[in-house]
Image: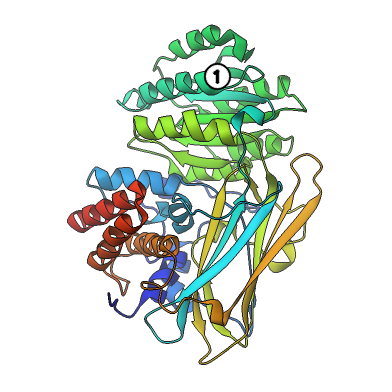
Amino acid sequence: MVVGVGLVTVLTLAACGGPGGSADGERAAQPAIGADRRPVPSATQTANAEEDGDKDTTTAQISTFALDVDTASYGYARRTLQEGRWPAPAEIRPEEWVNAFRQDYAQPSGDGFAVHVDGAKLPSRDEAVMRVGLQTRGTDAAQRRPANLTFVVDVSGSMAEPGRLDLVKSALNKLLDQLAPGDQVSIVAFSDEATVLASMTPLTAREELRSAVDELVVDGGTNLESGLVAGYEEASKAFRTAATNRVILLSDGLANQGSTEWQAILDRVEEHAGKRVTLLTVGVGRDYGDELMEQLADNGDGMAVYVSSQEEADRIFATQLPATIELRARDAKAQVVFNPSVVESYQLVGYENRALDAEEFRDDTRDGGEIGPGHSVTALYALRLKPGAEGQLAQATVRWQDPDTRAASEESASLRADDLAGSVWDEAPVRLQVDVVVAAFAGYMRDKKAFGLDLSTLGEHASRLATDSEDPMVAELATLIDKARSVG
């Protein structure tokens, strides 16, 4: 199948955003995040993205970023499309779309990372896509260390919408069935104020915890700060050195009482993250404070997910969360060094608010990403190659700290120009093709007027890959692309 020229443009704009790269309405009025975090690009920056997004290897050989396993952006965009709405451009983070899909990377034998680097040439002359895949080893939930989990549950009036609090309560009960006897759980509810419904309770007393879940009833406003403060206080009081200590926030993220200044909330979360209490944000609801929940997860050394159906809730709470509660790596970062004699220019897709300076890669005081067992992280690069160039194209390195000792480790892999598959659509691995389609779709949703590939072509590729991969998520992707055609 022949594709029109412009896939590098698609991937580049997916990375940088288009003129619609900032939110409008009430989210645009939200205070800015802290200066020590990399902010989402402004409308002015994204408007000029196509012009200055590519990095010329003669002046910028090195790309560095903190790892991220969030998937909330894709989950929420999927819901909005299914409901016949176009996602807000500022809520589309392409890396979260790609990381929502299965990758099938080989796992390492130890507790660090396996690094995989591959790529393929694009239809346009001297253009290619390169994929950096990082994978941690999975674990048997029965063999993991015990966990202290503090659930902070939003019971404000907005959670009365069908599919919010009822979904949360069902998910919590399913999780209680999956946790091990050595685990402990506390439950905090918040609306106008926070209430501790269950102090840290061992799983041997499941019925007491189920009774606390039953007490979750909708009432009042959304004092998100109060809920998080109470949750972290509970987690801190019951902190166990030999356990995994985590706060899990379940909310629509629409704070309207207490301190609604983002920085005040983010500072509290970051303080506790430094004390080895990590955060998972679980988003629900048709109206959703995406950016706040994502930044909470980043500051809290955790991850952000979004659920809109019982099936998704069951997958996360009954399968994914019990197996990935503990950590494999703290402050994980990636650095890719390009060979300027082979690569003329490159563009990283996404990771705008995770970007680091090159010298921060080995600065272990600089925040990275927290990665659990069995997690994969994928980064795509759009490349412009020098005509006829040969030799090593790039080397990718991941650096992380041991969750307990904070000892730093690194692992690397490289890719040669002649290792690139001859055609992304005919010779590249199926999973790489899926990643390219997902990233291109994310780019289209940010600015549908800016791309060389149209939704019809993307849909054709997604439908073919759904058959080739036998993956229901890829089949759903094809359906979403068709939905976007009708919505747009």
| Mark 1 closeness class: few <14, some 14–19, many ≥20 residues within 10 Å | many
Where residue 13 sits in the image (x, y, percent)? 41, 69
Residue type pointed to by label 1: Val
Q: Where is residue 474 in the image (x, y as percent from the top left)?
A: 34, 52
User: In the image, what residue occupies the spot 55% across and 42% down?
Assistant: 303
Q: Where is residue 165 in the image (x, y as percent from the top left)?
A: 39, 23
Residue located beneath label 1 in the image: 188
| Viewport quadrant of the C terminus | bottom left
Q: Which colour scheme is used?
A: rainbow
Report which quarter residue 161 is drawn in: top left
418 and 75: which is toward the camera:
418
In this orientation, does residue 259 appear?
Answer: no
Q: Which of 439 and 40 is in front in this view?
A: 439
Question: From what the image shows, is residue 83 above or below residue 60?
Answer: above
Q: Secondary structure beneath disc 1?
A: strand
Position of residue 285 relative to residue 346, above or below, is above
Is 85 displayed left or right of 166 in the figure? left
Query: Quick one: quadrant of the N terminus?
Result: bottom left
**Image coordinates for residue 330, horizontal then vertical, percent:** 70, 46
Q: Is residue 305 above or below residue 440?
A: above
Residue at horizontal 44 percent and vertical 79 percent from the top: 422
User: What is the number of callouts on the image?
Assistant: 1
